[in-house]
Amino acid sequence: MSGEINSRNEEGDKKREGEQKTEVVKRRLLARIQASCHLRSKSAQSSMLLIVIVIMIFVGLAVFLLGLASTVGGNEFTALYVNNLLLSVMRTDTGYTDSKCKLVSDLVFCAYFTPEWQCGPGVPNCLELANNTITNYMAIFGNATKSMKYLFTVTPAFVVRDPSGEPISLDIGDNTLKKSKTDTLKLYSHPLVISKSVGSNQYTLKIQLIISKK
Amino acid sequence: MDCKILGARFPSVQRKGQSEIMEYILMVVFIVAAIIAIIIFLTWWNLQQFQMDAFKNRQDRVVGIGQYIMGDYMFTNGDSVFDDAKLTAINASMSCDDLQKILGTNWYVKIKALDMAGEKPCKWNDYPDCNVWSICTYKENAKDRLGQNFPVNVYRKVSDKTALGVLYVEVYS
């Protein structure tokens, strides 16, 4: 009896061992299949990422080349234009015969050093007249070609500073152009230096023109 | 059809193969589309470059003609100050062919003094009550026109005054 029982127990143990081994193999196989599926999805993800990166590189290249194209050209013309505009306005006659007011440049000089001077009886003072004359000439020029924002800044060759430490300058035109960073196409002329002798003293002024599209 | 391996469900080998083929087809389509897009972009870019070069050449020519006329003592008293007497004399005595020998063909120049309203062409009979001088003739049917305005001064000899003016230079093909 006991021998039979023993042999049955042994058979049962073997069966259990076999089942356990099958279970282990099954789990390992499942794990391998799952891992290979995981790897496949990862490779798909990486190829998608690669495609996105390539597209981004192409878009970036296109934007860079287009940006480069828009900035090329027109530099010589614009430099000539802004410098000629400053010179032409300054050399134009005002219509007054007083030596302090004959040309626009004389008027600017007068407006900086003697702003209260009057070019004739019943005529506005130099500062007001300079403002009016330049505004009028720029409007005439704008009507003949195209209107633009402009600013004439007049500073002395020697540095004179106001109490806040800023150099004293005479500005005629659109003051926002001086500090504005939003104006896309802002053009600066070369400073025009004009000198004048008053008595035994020599005075020098620097005039610069800034223009921008309206 | 899905198949069962050791009790778990997995896509059949046939289905996996199909999806792989689809993946390759999509990849090939994408690569071909990318190559075509690159070819189109590069062709367009080349055309743009040609057009830009052509524009730059014409603009250089406009600036060149403008600078020549503004600096020549035949027309001016100095740097960009045109003399109305000289301009009127040139208009009456010189032909366009003479200037075309120096500056080439296919261009047109107009100088306008801004001290008068409107436009009054300058001839011997009208001088000095006029404000427009044209050098060479304006062609209506010309192609590829490019014109630029330059601020200048015009010296009025009779009144001894300097007026604001505009020099208009145009080139065409």
Image: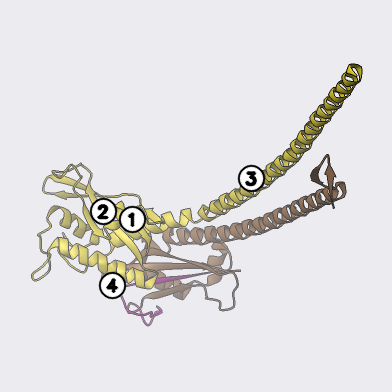
Chain colours: A yellow, B brown
- Of marks 3 and 1, which one's residue comes earlier in the chain? 3
Please, what secondary structure does the residue beneath circle 4 have? Answer: loop
Foreground mark, 3 or 2, reads 3
Asked whether residue B122 is drawn in magenta, I would say yes
Q: Residue furthest front?
A: A1
SS state under label 3: helix
Gap between marks 2 and 4 measured at Cα: 33 Å
Tell me if I can see residue A169 in this picture. Answer: yes
* Residue farthest toward the bottom in the current orientation of the protein: B125
Determine the residue positioned at 59% across, 74% down: B142
Q: Which residue is mark 4?
A: B158
Give the distance between the C-alpha atoms of the residues marked 1 and 2, in whole angstroms: 8 Å
Callout 2: chain: A
Type of the residue with mark 3: Ile
Tell me, yes or no, if residue A93 can be seen here: no
Chain where mark 1 sits: A
The verdict on residue A43 being magenta is no
Q: Earlier in the sequence, mark 1 or mark 2?
A: 2
Left or right of residue A117: residue B51: right
Residue A40: percent from the left, percent from the top? 75, 41
Q: Give the CA distance from mark 3 to mark 2.
A: 50 Å
Q: Quadrant of residue A133?
A: bottom left
Task: Identify the residue position indicated by label 1 in the image.
Answer: A210
Say yes or no: labels 3 and 1 on the same chain: yes
